[in-house]
Amino acid sequence: MSHCFTLIPHKKDFTAYADVCFKEFGDRVLYWTTINEGNVFAMGGYDNGVTPPGRCSFPFGQMCTEGDSVTEPYIAGHNMLLAHSSAVKLYYKKYKAVQHGFVGLNIYSSWFSPYSNATEDVTATQRVIDFYIGWFMHPMVFGDYPDIVKKNAGSKIPVLTPRESKLIQGAFDFRGLNHYNLVYVKDNPSSFEMNVRDITADVAASFFLEPEDAPQNQNDDPSSSLSGILEYLKTAYGNPPTYIHENGLRTERNGTLYDIPRVNYLHSYIGTLLEAIKNGSNTKGYFQWSFLDGLELFGGYERGSGLYYVDLDDKQLRRYRKLSADWYYNFLKGRTIRPAEITEVETGVFGSSTSKASE
């Protein structure tokens, strides 16, 4: 599966770039993801400026030299949808009959659960879902943005013309999803009191509440977040073919190979995924993030998500397999080991701090 496209130029330029990719690699690549984490790219790159291209405006972003956090995220999202859909149209017109490939777009989303049973929190949760998922999914399935997004964003979000709506609606073969966690949503109506609002304020909810901050009466299994989001895609958007492009656990890179928290995470989330498929989810594939500890967008080299540890102090950058690498290998071979059955003694089997990954 190729993530060939990352930047957001003019629609015609993007389509010309896609044409080159399809032409040069289409004999080997069957699955194309035009844009990775389109929703986060718009917010991180054009609202708070924490990701490239680093555009924002005060007070919504503190480190940018140019940008407009109020309008640019919506414009960027709009242009991504148009650029993606134009590339899909090109592929179907020029390459599909010969290459028989598939084209999709990826979004990032946690799953969201109400902080309480209060109507305000339940309503706020749906609002967050519409902004995080519906912002991109709704136009591609129904041809327009969700009503609450249009209402809260007002004139800041571009209007889809009939021609654009026709271009975007149905322009995907699959939906790519990057998903890691569950967060709780608590209504925060004070956001609406601001004279000028960015996209986060338009959501009007405080949704950065991790499971450990949930009320005591909440006993959700964090891995249920994956079944929650897949069930929502099934019921709200017609159960599109879905690929989990990223799912995994980021931890401190402290050199330990006995990463039992990652084993627990993978065991739980993959089990949840299998149950979702049994319940009718049209999920076609799963990719664990990631194979190696790498340079994380948030956390740099201090944190890692890999099944293999990379020794940055070694000139050869030697790699060492972690416990999770062997657990995942056994899972793929049909030999699932429950985390509770693993003891530290088994690290002699799964690898040690002196054994090279290549061995």
Image (tube, rainbow, N blue to C red):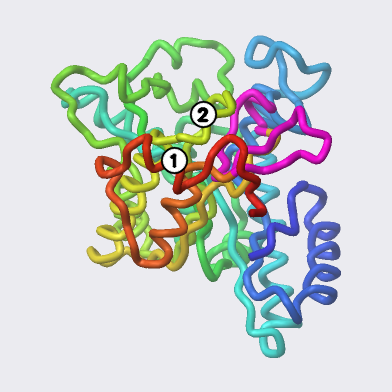
Image quadrant holding the N terminus, namely bottom right
Q: Residue at x 32, y 32 (%)?
A: 125
Q: Nearer the viewer, residue 21 or 2?
A: 2
- Along the polypeptide, which appears first: circle 1 or circle 2? 2
Q: Residues within 10 Å of mark 1 (few under 14, many from 20)?
A: some
Residue type at the position of mark 1: Thr
Let me know if residue 161 is in the magenta part: no
Residue receiving disc 1: 347
What secondary structure predominates along the stretch shown in magenta? Answer: loop
Residue type at the position of mark 2: Thr
The mark found on residue 143 in the picture is: none
The answer to which quarter of the image holds residue 344 is top left
| Image side of residue 340 versus residue 21, left or right | left
Q: Residue at x 54, y 70 (%)?
A: 173
Indicate the position of residue 196 as horizontal and vertical percent values.
Answer: 58, 15
Indicate the position of residue 51 as horizontal and vertical percent values.
Answer: 70, 30
Q: Nearer the viewer, residue 81 or 101?
A: 101
Foreground mark, 1 or 2, reads 1
The answer to which quarter of the image holds residue 212 is top left
326 above or below 132?
A: below
Residue that protrudes farthest toward the bottom in the picture: 98
Q: Residue at x 67, y 43 (%)?
A: 319
Q: Mark 2: which secondary structure?
A: strand
Q: Nearer the viewer, residue 164 or 63?
A: 63
298 above or below 279?
A: above
The answer to which quarter of the image holds residue 60 is top right
Residue receiving disc 2: 251
Q: Mark 1: which secondary structure?
A: helix
Q: Which residues are magenta?
A: 296-320
Residue that protrudes farthest toward the left in the picture: 217
